[in-house]
Amino acid sequence: MPGVTLLDDFIALRQDLRAAAVGDGGLDTCSVLTQALDAAVRSLFPDDVEGSAALVAIGSFGRGELCLWSDVDLMLLHDGADPDRLVKAVFYPLWDANLKVGHAVRTPRECAAAARDRIETLTSLLSARLIAGDGALLERLGTVMSNVVSGRPLAPHLADLERERRKRDPYPVIAADVKSGRGALRTFQAFDWERRRALLMGHAPDGETVEERAGRSTLLAVRNGLHSAAGRAFDVYDFDARDQVARWLDSDVKTVTRRLCHSLQLGDRLAEAHWPMLLVSGDPLARVGRKMLGRLRGQRRGEAALNGSGPLGAAARIATASHGVVIDTAARASLGAETDDPWSDAERAAFLTLISSGERGRVVFGWLEQLGWADRHFAEWVTISGMPQLAPFHEHPVDAHLWRATDEIIELIANPDPFIRGILAELGSTDDVVLAAFLHDIGKGGGGDHSEVGAEVAARFLTRAGFESSIVESVTAAVRNHLLLARTASRRDIASPDVIDEVANEVGGLRDLQVLYLLTVADSKATGRTMWSEWKETLLRQLYTRVATRFGAGEEARVVHAEHVAELTGERFTARAVAGHLSSLPGEYAETTDPDDVVWHLEAIAELAGTTRLVVDGSGNRVLVVGRDRRGFLLSICRAFAAHGIGVHDARLYTRGDGVVIDVFEVREDPGGAPVPEERWAKVRETLSGVETGGRDLLEAVRQRAAAYDTGPRASVVVRHRPELSSRHTVLEVRAADRVGLLVDIVEALYDEGLDLHLARIDTRANQAIDVLHVRRSGEAIEDRSVLDDLCRSLERRIGG
């Protein structure tokens, strides 16, 4: 049968296209696929049809945008023909070929009724294209559809759909759904639906611009690349697929990702132009921006911002208008007006107001970019606009991340918790905090260390804009050090006085620390879902508090005293007993442990008696395990955690001179990262208490759990020595794809190498584990470089294998 042969040819073509794209991989590849399927489907349509019938492509097939694994959307349009015979002739071979066929069988009248009933049917029929059969029947469909659309405006519905997409993704994301995500193909298709509606009504719509067509083709190219990589319909630009997509497009990941980000950004901007009602109401971030504006007005700055005569003044007025953002001809003229440097006080105030106005501020700022203001006055921003961030834990392009960080700062200022409220009360003006959030990654377009480069770029921009020197100095310091607190809290022993002194010396003063703390919170929240957690918040606050004492804020941290601990126990433990406990442990124990925790440890140790060799006490997300030291003790504990689905964030481990082990863990439910619910602790205690006799069973349970969750091949493991992180211990950093049982493998490898683990900081970003381990061998740090190099290579083999 000719039709079946042509269908086989289409299947073969699709397989060939998995190996290499045609043309740009987007519209070019889609056109080749569409033409091949047109020929195959046309050949299936019988020549001897009695009555009137037509085979019509709709959806992506109708638009000529058929991707490698797109659904094949077909409609049998009939009037007087035998539809059953045609269904068997056309649809059955497609189903037999395992194509996913979206099919409908309707008369023109039924099409009109379905279009009136469901907007999805209406938009699908707007893409109708004749493949075979009676062309006059398709013309009749056009006539009835013109009657349907004349009484049914599309714009409000399409704006609502775009609003829903933005609700799902308030900020542009790199791992975008290129079919249905924010600014993606559905957005571009909506523009086409509006144009087709206008044609049906006899109007002459504006045609597709060259820029719009290029953006659409880029999105189709990435979608085809994803289909090629997955061998099925898959539309999310997932981190694991990016290399394959880039190879299929004969390009590199950075280039493809940047093109994708720019196309999504274009979709956003075109949507705002097509549907002015998009941002008229319902924007919670705009409400936060208006709260901020109220504070500015209270400082007599907000009025100056809104009274400015240049583009920034106009931008501030549009972004904060009660009726929402409307970019009409007059607004574009005001936003694109020429102005002379230097900036006035009103323009500086307007800039701060604009970047503090949430999504509306972003939209208006985007128009400033498009109309040339940024090229003339803020070229530093143009460099990072739409720039992708390729690390898997970064969810947004650089500019979107900076906007989100600024919004997070505004939210912290507008709705502070008690801890931050105290900082804000001492801080006073927050202009420098807002500017630091907006500029902290501005150096990512300049090469080199983006913190150092960014400090120089921020200082240059702020000085040129005429901000006062105190603001320039504060923002510059914050940009330079914006990674300091997060890196220190997640990698170093923040209870060490030496570490606190280093951070204090780097920061310089209390106000700089306060600005840096707020920026770190906002930056972490704005980076991605895996970069902020209750555990990280706790570590960061502990670090802030300890560094603040170096600047005279709060009480100076002191070594714990036996008499104080004894008082806390109500004399259950004498000062002499407490002193004996402290002296039998390394000196850092007294330096780094809170008195209340010392009491906790003593009470657990007191339960050890007779044959009892293990005491487990846990609540919330902290668990204490106390027992008699033996080889493999920690390994058994880690196996128990892994078998029970408990992930470890942090571990601090001590051994007394009499062989009593004190292990404290910060934990969470694995693999989802949620807090461990209270009702599970009884089972956790039961499981951990069985560690002494359940070694083999636990190991098998870990293997079974790992097999259930980890289905892919093991990625490579990288182990590095990080001498700058501690002078007391050998610090090893292990980077690997996160998986169930990874910590078990790490601890087992450490034991095999004769290493004692004293402190572990377990950090998971997206799907990557970054574990920092403070270890010693025979009670000493390892300093021989060749020994360290051999150790790192050996650990990579053991953990990876």
Image (cartoon, grey):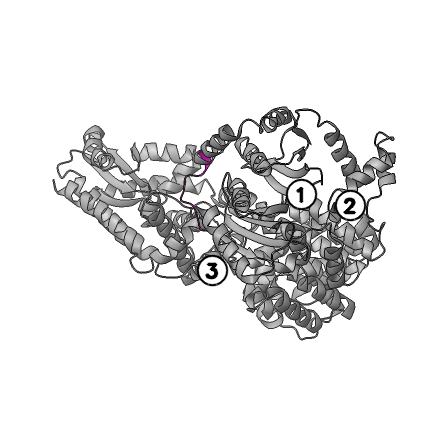
Q: Which callout, 3 or 1, points at the residue further toward the start of the chain?
A: 3
What kind of residue is marked 2?
Ala
Q: Position of residue 424 (x, y in %)?
A: 79, 52
> x, y percentage for residue 152?
46, 40
Q: Nearer the viewer, mark 2 or mark 3?
A: 2
Quick one: SS at disc 3?
helix
Is 679 inside the magenta-drawn segment? Answer: no
Which residue is label 2 attached to? 590
Horizontal side of 727 relative to 161 (left or right) equals right
Can you tell which of label 3 and label 1 is closer to the viewer?
1
CA distance for labels 3 and 1 = 42 Å
Over which residues does the magenta segment extend? 708-716
- Magenta span dominant secondary structure: loop
Badge 2 or badge 3: first in the primary sequence: 3
Q: Residues within 10 Å of mark 3 (few under 14, many from 20)?
A: some
For disc 3, the marked residue is 258
Q: Amino acid at mark 1?
A: Arg
- Which is more toward the observer, 157 or 33? 33
Residue shown at 16% from the left, 40% from the top: 4
Q: Which labelled disc corresponds to residue 147?
A: none
Query: Badges 3 and 1: C-beta atoms under 8 Å apart?
Result: no
SS label for mark 2: helix
Task: Single out the mark in the foreground, 2 or 1.
Answer: 2
Contact (Cβ within 8 Å) of mark 2 with mark 3: no
Question: Rounded to the nearest whole Å, what is the CA distance between mark 2 and mark 1?
Answer: 13 Å
